[in-house]
Image: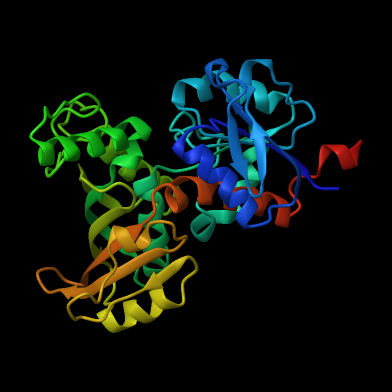
């Protein structure tokens, strides 16, 4: 007997990706249900070679559902995830609503899969921010080898991280530039077409943005609270795929060659670093792929035990949907949950 899985936010970018990945990876589900708000009621979404009719979240009974993949935003998650968890369904939440709750594990399976057992406190597991997910996949094996002291990261984040409206805005603005039309700014604070915006999420009192704060807090929670991290998060005119320029300072020496070998053997990572024109990965190549790609690995001689590298991943997949499904696979593979229908 397989599991019953519900996907909340099934009509959004990440929700659709979750359905695709569940099918691609042959997740052991007998039943998959697509849920969204009432305004999406009756819409159809694809699940493998099947078509699912979207049901309304507020009319759905989770008592016989095993896993809920939640991708409907923070406010919806705050309202619904605790209710769903109380019905005995494990929620894997893609929003920031519960990431910093000490009773909710924050999980990237390649980094801290063992921490998933903490889900029993609230029946909720948090998925990290998309920019943090790919970063910690790359940092984890390096931290184990030489202990990270400090990280300086600049992100180059695609518009898909801000949703479908943001993708439409980039498309429409780009078309307007070429047709001498009006460039309308709606989703972003400034024009995004042929531009970059050093601002993601709201500003905080210290001058950083919440996106930058998330990277700090989440890296500390998942990897090591002693790591010092500073981030500058930038939105760029790319549809899918986040890129990061990462500078790391270690407690012990780690050569570029050693780091390359460590990363080549680490789970979830593909190293493509030829030190020649085109010998690196860009977001265009990473789109639609599961891996976190690392390129441009080199020593930083301006600090003791310093290393720099370039990191790219599909933010809709590893940054969101794929990581969520991988967490569900950990629950199943480690037999931390049993199908309710089987139990009945």
Q: Is residue 58 left or right of residue 66?
A: left
Q: Is residue 295 visible?
A: yes
Q: Residue at x 52, y 40 (%)?
A: 16
Q: Residue at x 26, y 77 (%)?
A: 253
Looking at the image, the residue that sits furthest to the front is 179
43 shown above or below 150: above
| Residue 176 horizontal/vertical position (percent) | 15, 35
| Residue 191 horizontal/vertical position (percent) | 13, 33
Q: Is residue 335 left or right of residue 196?
A: right
Q: Residue at x 39, y 54 (%)?
A: 314
Q: Residue at x 35, y 41 (%)?
A: 217
Q: Is residue 167 left or right of residue 61?
A: left
262 shown above or below 49: below
- Looking at the picture, tell me which residue is in the foreground, 251 or 298: 298
- Looking at the picture, tell me which residue is in the foreground, 341 or 193: 193
Quadrant (top left/top right/bottom left/bottom right) for the C terminus: top right
């Amino acid at each position: 007997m397989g599991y019953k899985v519900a996907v909340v936010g099934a009509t959004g970018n990440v929700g659709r990706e979750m359905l695709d990945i569940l099918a691609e990876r042959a997740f052991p589900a007998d039943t998959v249900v697509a849920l969204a708000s009432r305004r999406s009621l009756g819409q159809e979404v694809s699940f493998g070679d099947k078509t699912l009719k979207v049901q309304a979240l507020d009319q759905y009974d989770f008592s016989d559902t095993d896993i809920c993949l939640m991708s409907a935003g923070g406010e919806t998650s705050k309202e619904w995830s605790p209710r769903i968890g109380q019905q005995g369904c494990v929620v894997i939440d893609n929003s920031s609503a519960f990431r910093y709750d000490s009773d909710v594990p924050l999980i990237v399976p390649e980094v801290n899969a063992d921490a998933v057992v903490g889900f029993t406190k609230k029946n909720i597991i948090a998925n990290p921010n998309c920019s943090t997910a790919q970063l910690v996949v790359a940092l984890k094996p390096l931290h184990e080898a030489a202990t990270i002291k400090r990280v300086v990261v600049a992100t180059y984040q695609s518009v898909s991280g801000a949703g479908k409206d943001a993708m439409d805005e980039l498309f429409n603005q780009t078309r307007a530039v070429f047709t001498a039309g009006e460039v309308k700014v709606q989703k972003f604070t400034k024009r995004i077409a042929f531009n970059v915006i050093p601002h993601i999420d709201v500003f905080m009192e210290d001058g950083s943005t919440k996106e930058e704060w998330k990277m700090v807090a989440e890296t500390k929670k998942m990897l090591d609270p002693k790591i010092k991290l500073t981030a500058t998060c930038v939105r760029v005119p790319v549809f899918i795929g986040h890129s990061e320029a990462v500078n790391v300072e270690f407690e012990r020496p780690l050569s570029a060659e050693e780091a390359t070998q460590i990363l080549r053997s680490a789970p979830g990572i593909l190293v493509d670093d030829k030190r020649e024109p085109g010998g690196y990965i860009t977001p265009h190549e990473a789109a639609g792929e599961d891996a976190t790609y690392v390129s441009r690995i080199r020593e930083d001689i301006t600090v003791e035990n310093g290393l720099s590298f370039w990191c790219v991943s599909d933010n809709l997949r590893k940054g969101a949907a794929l990581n969520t499904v991988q967490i569900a696979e950990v629950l199943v593979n480690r037999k931390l949950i049993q199908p309710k229908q089987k139990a009945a």
